[in-house]
Image (cartoon, grey):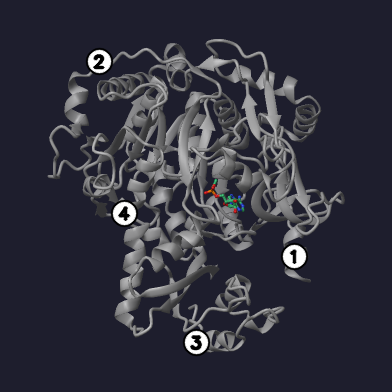
Amino acid sequence: MNSETKTDAAVYPPSADFAASAHVDADRYAELYKASIEDPEGFWAEEAKRIDWIKPFSTVKDVNFDLGNVSIKWFEEGTLNVAANCIDRHLETRGDQTAIIWEPDEPNDEAQHITYRQLHRSVCKMANILEDMGVRKGDRVVIYLPMIPEAAYAMLACARIGAIHSVVFAGFSPDALGARINGCDAKVVITADFAPRGGKKTALKSNTDKALLHCKDTVKCLMVRRTGEQTTWVDGRDHDYNELAIEADDHSAPVEVGAEDPLFILYTSGSTGQPKGVVHSSGGYLVYTAMTHQMTFDYHEGDIYWCGADVGWVTGHSYILYGPLANGATTLMFEGVPTYPDAGRFWQIVAKHGVNQFYTAPTALRALMGQGNEWVEKHDLSSLKVLGTVGEPINPEAWNWYYKVVGKEKCPIVDTWWQTETGGHLLTPLPGATPLKPGSATKPFFGVQPVVLDPHTGQEIAETKAEGVLCLKDSWPAQMRTVWGDHERFEKTYFSDYKGYYFSGDGCRRDADGDYWITGRVDDVINVSGHRMGTAEIESALVAHEKVAEAAVVGYPHEIKGQGIYAYVTLMSGQEPSEDLRKELEQFVRSEIGPIAKPDLIQWAPGLPKTRSGKIMRRILRKIAEDDYGSLGDTSTLADPSVVDDLIEHRMNRK
Ligand code: WTA
């Protein structure tokens, strides 16, 4: 039996008990999905009632996917305030309910339980502080914070005053931060003194100081004291959040914004050039994240929900903050890492707070799986009802471990496929409705129309069983609207390869049951520990080093990270390869982009395989990195075939 048939064969239908109390069972899924496709306007007009509108919309949907005229609008005339939807409207009914449970890095430090009323106060104060610093509706604010409650306050405060936030992951370097501040012309950057994580500390304020050296001198900095340690201080530019919060007014009227006004920008890697600023809307985004949060996780009133992502990624935006809070949920925010102080930390937190839904990335599961089951078994995980994964395909071994050891074969696993660009889940099982298959993201969410295209002809494959590139035929409310400042790039990236469709950049297979299996990126984007990275970005960091003439980066299979970073480096003539230089280059990439971009393997390449027109043949480099050089395919277009023999001979040991 080959592995494909084997994995296809394992099917776990929802239990009757679970289905009976779920928001959506199989019949309801079929009925609602049909309605959502046959009458999208009617369907989404109804779903839009999930949120409070200030002025109603009259047009549900106005979408054009044609290259040159791409335009995506939902609920266009409607106005709202996102923060009021996430906080104010809950005050009367659940003011004293916990909105956010904050679990600090050190297990012995006290967790915080922040009620909706307290959240309201803190967000209003932050909103007033930002307004006092000159931030107005439509202005951009960069947020470079650890996973602390103030990150949530900052995002919601921006939403309250109609400012657009752009969160930068705290693991990014000063250069990456500076580029993002400049990229969206931010007025203010919000940071912390230090970011404790896994027992270590990142000096965020000092990174911010370095970044600001390359920004306009009008950019102001608001600093949250997380550890209280000494930092440098620039009078006039730097503002002390903790001091200002004492005096700040705790009332702030939510600003009315249009449904299509941007809520946030989030930079993400693509296959070419600099990261793109993905722009999300206010109205459609909130409707869709609220709905998917409730249905994908089968969230019920009173449940304790935990998404283990970082607010620096889209998962943190949609499924730590906006979706859950729009639903009046209790959402847990964790500052640390899964393996600190030991490999039982996740499960200790689940037991401590009685977590009902838990959502994480396969890479974390693979890392924990290797540490032994005792770390899981010593904690009481009986509160768990639904488990989720996101960010990369989950291999069946990790799925089975999650299902058996963590979920005790009682918790459905929702394998959610989506992207920064999609705002929310597009393919996912619904736990009371969908038969699960380890490794498959199964079926489309309501309103979502996936298609598999033949990559060569660009035609839709009509048969159920299909393999090709994954595209979307029509819009959904949380779709990104544009690339910040570059609508042409938006169109070119997502709408030019396959005319009339949104192109995801992922390959996929659809099996005979119509279930989708993501096979990974078909472009030059790699997925390292669930983090998306453009190989072009790492290459340009490498060639920025004075001793490097040329570099080519590809992914290779990595047991824990999913994909590892394999870099081929050609040195300037006269430079000698050495271990010291290898370390220097690793360090260089860390400081240019951040620790997540550090190459795992660097191979010294006297030459790179190129076509006669000078194009690097990445396919060959990928094969060598994958240790699969027996099947290099067509090499007849190589300018100098001997280059390949040298690369094979000196390939790196992947262990
Ligand atoms: C990959 C993260 C397989 C995919 C929300 C996508 C997945 C990219 C899955 C987006 C999944 C995400 N199964 N692959 N369940 N979820 N991916 O923008 O390649 O950081 O295009 O968004 O991650 O990554 P991003």
Dots 3, 4 in contact, CB < 8 A: no
> Please, what is the three-letter code of the amino acid marked with disc 1?
Glu
Few, some or many residues within 10 Å of mark 2 (<14, 14–19, 20+): some
Q: Earlier in the sequence, mark 3 or mark 2?
A: 2
> Please, what is the three-letter code of the amino acid marked with disc 4?
Gly
- Indicate left or right for 527 with 575 as reference: right
Mark nearer the viewer, 3 or 2: 3
Residue 166, given in percent of the width and then of the height, sits at 41, 37
Residue position marked by numbered label 4 in the rendering? 198
Few, some or many residues within 10 Å of mark 3 (<14, 14–19, 20+): few
Q: Quadrant of the N terminus?
A: bottom right
- Indicate left or right for 35 with 75 as reference: right
The answer to which quarter of the image holds residue 46 is top right
Q: Earlier in the sequence, mark 3 or mark 4?
A: 4
Residue position marked by numbered label 3 in the rendering? 650
Label 4: state its secondary structure. Answer: loop
Residue 530, given in percent of the width and then of the height, sits at 51, 55
Label 2: state its secondary structure. Answer: loop
CA gap, disc 4 and disc 1: 38 Å
Label 1: state its secondary structure. Answer: helix
The answer to which quarter of the image holds residue 233 is top left
- Indicate left or right for 456 with 315 as reference: right
CA gap, disc 3 and disc 4: 36 Å
Few, some or many residues within 10 Å of mark 4 (<14, 14–19, 20+): some
> Please, what is the three-letter code of the amino acid marked with disc 2?
Asp
